[in-house]
Image: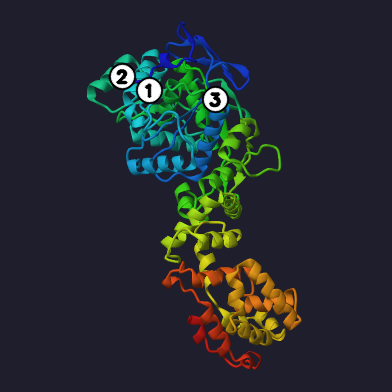
């Protein structure tokens, strides 16, 4: 079990003082020292404590295993990881599972899986161990009780026997008087005899921390700058419940102190907790860590990002086909930048560039469109072998191709990758390429322009080239063969540029738009000759395409006669 003595950076001096004397706290926070005056009704003491700049950097990410890892939590974990790595320090993972009703091992495993997927390897924590464990709060109860008893003996904590009804009545009275709903101190000045009588009756009690009535706390937050609180806004607060379970703020303080955490980088919603935690640090003689509170991640409407805005958990984005490197890159840019126009960073580059001083204190907008675009950039920057393997396996699993590798896969990925932002997009891209929606295209508004440009005459010449074997012979030679053939074909029809290639695209692919028409046509020819396309893929072969062209009654389009869609299902 970790102890204060195990923390190499810890040093403190405790000097007992007389009752009701002031106690002084000097604490380095950021780059400044401050002096705080605290007065306790019982025993008090003076502390000189400093985390010091010479100590090793130790940060922690402490998720609660009550659900999936939210992107906000993932960004907090990332900032902690980057800070630790950039300073040569340690990244500690601690599971805060004191919410026994909601915490599950399934959620814990999911969080660990998501962090590993992102590449955020922890130096200490579950599955790894370390010198400061256990790393689950549920396994540290003996430690919390030990420190709670120390606070009770020193007079910083007292037993409170107030019932829930009494506490509710206090809140109602405070509300009527328009005062903060703070505890009135009913048991703060109880005599020893009164306490013994309640203990003898077996009355349930909590441990309450004595909060000074005057004074304030001031910290120099590494992100938000100077932040202060007055003590009179906070009543005596509970650190141990009547069932013996410790309260969050008490657990966190004891854990961070006994694990020698030097920097606490966490979400800004924890900023109000700092006052309670600072008082506990002081009372136990622990040095204060440096604090850095990261802004919230906001939805486009500037509300807090939630499930109603779509996917919000790391696991959801992974299942949607996002790459971990794209998620890490995008999350890093939510509130941080290196001061340049560059937006693309690997995890290693982020470690090199990251500084806590460049983290913005204002809320960051989560833009799913930009995340998708960024994922596409990362996907296309993968080595060709890796990209071919990923997409080839996706096509094979979707029963579009018979093999997940080979020349056809390589050519198809090369042709289609610019239109693929997410791995699942590749299925639609290849399926669309293999389809032949000619009738729908000709019947569309844009299709009418092609009809007016004499596409029927181009179709006659194209059928002749196919029937003679001239077209297939050229395509068998690949791109050079296509280029030679299309040049001759254009001269024959006295067409060039858009006037030549747009009709050819419609007739050969059945579509008005798509990737390079030459590469597309060559790939379609290979699809029909290589045996790479699965029978159930819905591929319309060249033979079937040219059969459809022969059966088209071109005059029906111009006379607005309803079209038969029978050929569409080929």
State the image coordinates of residue 232 (x, y, percent, origin top left).
53, 26
Identify whether 333 is placed above or below 300: above
User: Where on the picture, by quarter, is residue 488?
Assistant: bottom right
Residue designated by label 1: 187
User: Where on the picture, by quarter, is residue 466?
Assistant: bottom right
The circle drawn on residue 88 is 3
Q: Along the horizontal axis of the image, is 179 left or right of 334?
A: left
* Of the pair 354 and 335, the residue shown nearer to us: 354
Q: Along the horizontal axis of the image, is 189 left or right of 317?
A: left
Residue designated by label 2: 195
**In the rendered view of the protein, which quadrant contains the N terminus?**
top left
Residue at left offset 56%, top offset 38%: 347
State the image coordinates of residue 6 (x, y, percent, origin top left).
41, 15
* Of the pair 152 and 548, the residue shown nearer to us: 548
Pointers 2 and 1 in contact (CB under 8 A)?
yes
What is the crowding at mark 1: few (fewer than 14 residues within 10 Å), some, or many (at least 20)?
some
Residue at left offset 41%, top offset 38%: 64
Pointers 3 and 1 in contact (CB under 8 A)?
no
Give the CA separation, mark 2 to mark 1.
9 Å
Q: Earlier in the sequence, mark 2 or mark 1?
A: 1
SS of the residue at dot 2? helix
């Amino acid at each position: 079990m970790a102890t204060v003595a195990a923390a190499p950076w810890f040093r403190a001096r405790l000097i007992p003082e007389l009752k009701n004397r002031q106690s002084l706290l000097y604490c380095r926070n950021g780059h400044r020292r401050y002096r705080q005056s605290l007065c306790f009704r019982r025993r008090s003491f003076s502390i000189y404590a400093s985390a010091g700049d010479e100590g090793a950097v130790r940060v922690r990410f402490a998720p609660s295993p009550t659900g999936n890892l939210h992107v906000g939590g993932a960004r907090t974990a990332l900032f902690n990881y980057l800070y630790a790595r950039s300073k040569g320090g340690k990244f500690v993972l601690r599971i805060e599972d004191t919410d026994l009703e909601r915490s599950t091992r399934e959620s814990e495993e999911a969080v660990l899986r998501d962090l590993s997927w992102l590449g955020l390897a922890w130096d200490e924590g579950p599955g790894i161990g370390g010198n400061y464990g256990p790393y689950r709060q549920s396994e540290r109860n003996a430690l919390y009780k030990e420190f709670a008893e120390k606070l009770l003996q020193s007079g910083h904590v007292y037993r409170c026997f107030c019932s829930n009804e009494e506490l509710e009545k206090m809140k109602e009275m405070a509300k009527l008087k328009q005062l903060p709903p703070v505890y009135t101190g009913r048991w703060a000045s109880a005599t020893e005899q009164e306490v013994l009588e309640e203990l003898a009756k077996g009355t349930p009690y909590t441990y309450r921390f004595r909060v000074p009535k005057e004074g304030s706390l001031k910290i120099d937050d590494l992100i938000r700058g100077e932040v202060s609180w007055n003590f009179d806004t906070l009543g005596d607060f509970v650190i141990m419940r009547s069932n013996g379970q410790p309260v969050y703020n008490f657990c966190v303080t004891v854990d961070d102190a006994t694990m020698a955490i030097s920097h606490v980088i966490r979400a800004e919603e924890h900023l109000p907790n700092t006052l309670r935690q600072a008082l506990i640090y002081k009372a136990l003689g622990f040095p204060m860590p440096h604090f850095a509170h990261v802004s919230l991640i906001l939805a486009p409407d500037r509300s807090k990002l939630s499930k109603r805005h779509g996917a919000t958990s790391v696991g959801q984005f992974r299942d949607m086909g996002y790459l971990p490197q794209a998620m890490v890159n995008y999350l890093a840019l939510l509130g941080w930048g290196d001061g340049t126009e560059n937006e693309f960073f690997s995890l290693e580059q982020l470690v090199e560039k990251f500084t806590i001083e460049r983290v913005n204190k204002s809320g960051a907008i989560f833009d799913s469109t930009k995340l998708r675009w960024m994922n596409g950039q990362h996907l296309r920057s993968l080595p060709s072998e890796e990209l071919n393997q990923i997409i080839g396996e996706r096509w094979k699993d979707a029963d579009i191709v018979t093999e997940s590798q080979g020349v056809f896969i390589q050519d198809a990925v090369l042709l289609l990758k610019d239109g693929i932002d997410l791995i699942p997009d590749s299925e639609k891209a290849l399926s669309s390429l293999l389809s032949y929606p000619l009738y729908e295209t000709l019947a569309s508004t844009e299709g009418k322009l092609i009809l007016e440009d004499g596409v029927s005459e181009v179709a006659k010449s194209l059928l002749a080239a196919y029937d003679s074997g001239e077209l297939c012979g050229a395509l068998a030679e690949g791109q050079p063969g296509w280029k030679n053939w299309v040049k001759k074909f254009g001269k024959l029809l006295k067409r060039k540029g858009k006037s030549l290639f747009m009709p050819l695209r419609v007739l050969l692919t059945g579509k008005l738009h798509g990737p390079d028409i030459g590469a597309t046509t060559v790939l379609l020819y290979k699809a029909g000759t290589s045996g790479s396309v699965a029978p159930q893929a819905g591929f319309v072969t060249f033979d079937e395409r040219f059969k459809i062209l022969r059966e088209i009654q071109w005059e029906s389009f111009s006379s607005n006669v309803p079209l038969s869609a029978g050929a569409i299902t080929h």
